[in-house]
Amino acid sequence: MVCLVVGSIAGWLSSLIVGIGWNMIFAMILAMLLGMIVGGLLFFPLGMLFGAMEVMLPAMLSGMVSGMLVGMWSTMESLTQLLGLGYGAVCGMGCLISIWVINNQLRGIQSNG
Amino acid sequence: MDNLTKTKWDKAAPTFEIMAGGGAEKRWKPFKEELFSHMSGRVLFLALGTGLDIPTFPKNKEITAIDISPKMLEVAQSRINAYSGSIKAEVMDVHELTYEDNSFDQVFTSCTFCSVPNPLNGLRSLRRVLKPDGQLFMFEHTGSRYYPFKIMMDLMTQITRKMGPDMNRNTVKNVEEAGFEINEINHLFLDVVKTIKATNPA
């Protein structure tokens, strides 16, 4: 849920700010930073509900990826705010699945460090 | 006494549980209960804070607990009183433990070494008061080895450090450098939230 919320907001903001014809690299970096800020800000209220660590990393990753992809896309074609929000949500869902997979790979007992 | 750290946590005490007492406590409760179930002999619990961990302690133990913040321990008092065993809570800085060498059989920490200003010295101090072959049990969050999580945690630490903990500590490495032998690391969430079991070699 956190990934969807942060991804949607980051995607919506990126589609709102970035316009057609912007330099793609600049747009990517700007929207990525914007997404991470969104994730960082939402970390505080959402972290209270679901736990700080379990929210911070998914939230920042979702914000970063959604902002980056929607920001780059917005330089190539005009995205409506609804599309930006939707693409952001899809990116958030992708991040959620990625973190679930990575977590399953990493978690568990390691003997002797 | 590190007054900067003491003041930081005194200020955080009234609102500490808003951030730390909700979802995180519910999620990690079974893991903490398992870790703390190993309590036996003379036990030191480091950084008792507001006593959020007390409900996960096994019943009827005698525990010595310290925290740098008297305000935190004031909040913890009701939980200390409600505990079935006995908890002797003292205001103390981990860097300046007043206990004699080889005083404790076990030391437990819970989300502590994200906040200790000099973690290596803190861990060495713990080693001093642990008996040879004494055990260290830690529930900690640390930095991640993996990108992009590593960068995110480095960035967030610039903010969270001012209010409370660092997010990017390499606690496992610090435990080893302090001279402990690591017996087990159990990653609970990514490589960030984990339990560490270590021994003070004789």
Image: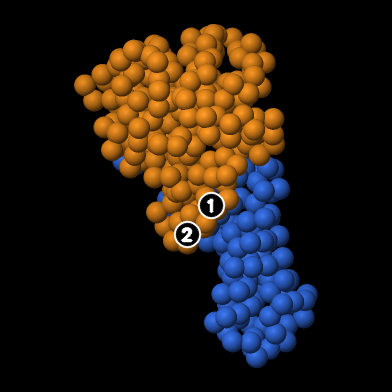
**Image marks 2 and 1: residues in contact by CB distance under 8 Å:** no
Location of residue B178 (image quadrant):
top left
Q: Residue at x 57, y 40 (%)?
A: B164
Label 1 sits on residue: B158
Location of residue B142 (image quadrant):
top left
Q: Secondary structure at mark 1?
A: helix
Residue B151's disc is: 2
Where in the figure is residue A88, as x and y percent of width and height? Answer: 67, 70
Tint applied to chain B in the drawing: orange
Height in image: A103 above or below A33?
above
Report crowding for label 2: few under 14, some 14 to 19, many 20 or more residues within 10 A (C-alpha): some
Looking at the image, which is closer to me, A64 or A89? Answer: A64
- The three-letter code of the residue at mark 2 reads Ile
Where in the figure is residue A40, as x and y percent of width and height? Answer: 63, 56
**What chain is tagged by disc 2?**
B
Count of marks overlaid on the render: 2
Q: Residue at x 52, y 29 (%)?
A: B3
| Horizontal side of residue B62 vs B170, given as left or right | right
Disc nearer the start of the sequence (2/1): 2
Height in image: B23 above or below B35?
below
Spatial CA distance of label 2 from label 1 is 11 Å
Letter of the chain shown blue in the rendering: A
Height in image: B61 above or below B179?
above
How is the model colour-coded? by chain
Where in the figure is residue A46, as x and y percent of width and height? Answer: 69, 49
Say which quadrant the C terminus of chain B sits in.
Answer: top left
Where in the figure is residue B186, as x and y percent of width and height? Answer: 41, 39
